[in-house]
Image: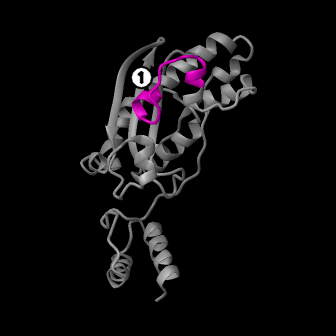
Amino acid sequence: MIDTYVSIDLETTGLQPKTDRIIEIGAVKVRRGQPTETFQTFVNPGRQLEERVMELTHIRQEEVDSAPHMEEVLPGLLDFLEELPLLCHRVLFDYSFLKKAAVNAGQPFEKQGIDTLRIARRFLPELEHRTLEYLCSYYQSPHQAHRAYEDARATSRLYHILAEQFYEQEAELFQPRELHYAVKKDSPASKRQKQRLYELMQKHKIGIDFDMDTITRSEASRYTDKLLAKYGR
């Protein structure tokens, strides 16, 4: 099995990389089966966190408000990741958000990855759930759910548990494979878009719950369309 990789997990504002943003990154670098380095940071998403996100992750608004933005975090993260494969529970989810951030910064981001969820689905179809939290409970492996660093550590432990039990049956599942996610670079919102949106929010007495300076062209269009649909012109 692969014994050198980076186990990484993200907390985000939602499930869609095209519209949602990263709010926390946690990663553990493993070499020859032993954890050697860690990476942890909150990320400022430039918007208000929804109540459901704060309840799920226990991340507070003030923690992300004082955190660096993704473009500030990315260089250090890329250095940390090196050319190592990624280990995640549902790897394409985390990879898609990271790829989106890299593309927006004009950086290449091609990776191989190993997915503990894919392994669990193959060998544990009888289980009621195959979430990371459920699997850790099933194997009595320590886990603090929905915090990025703890999820990354738990995923690494789970990978080794699954390998001990199932590697000989289907070694290919425990090997990295190429990850693919097609994404386009976001363009910043134009001055005219921002002004139009600001005028609509003022007119309808709506507070701004996002950073107008970092809003993208597509986000500005979505916000404007929602306001027009709700309040009319």
Residue at the image position 57 percent from the left and 36 percent from the top: 91
Viewer-proximal residue, 178 or 46? 46
Q: Which residues are magenta?
A: 135-152
Q: Is residue 32 left or right of residue 207?
A: right
Q: Pick the quarter of the image with the N terminus.
A: top right
Query: Is residue 176 visible from the viewing direction of this image?
Result: yes
Q: Is residue 5 left or right of residue 38?
A: right
Within 10 Å of the Cα at label 1, are there few (<14), some (14-19), or many (20+) other Cα atoms? many
Query: Is residue 83 visible from the viewing direction of this image?
Result: no
Q: How is the image coloured?
A: one colour
Tell me where residue 155 appears, x and y as whole percent: 52, 25
User: In this picture, is 218 found above or below 100?
Assistant: below
Viewer-proximal residue, 176 or 19? 19
Residue at the image position 58 percent from the left and 40 percent from the top: 92
Residue at the image position 50 percent from the left and 21 percent from the top: 156
Q: Which residue type carries mark 1?
A: Lys
User: In this picture, is 185 found above or below 228?
Assistant: above
User: In this picture, is 67 found above or below 155?
Assistant: below
- Magenta-drawn stretch contains 66: no
Q: Which residue is mark 1?
A: 29
User: In this picture, is 202 found above or below 65?
Assistant: below
Viewer-proximal residue, 205 or 92? 205
**Extreme residue toward the bottom, this view:** 233
Tell me where residue 220 appears, x and y as whole percent: 43, 71
Is label 1 in a helix, a strand or a loop? strand
Tell me where residue 45 appears, x and y as whole percent: 36, 53
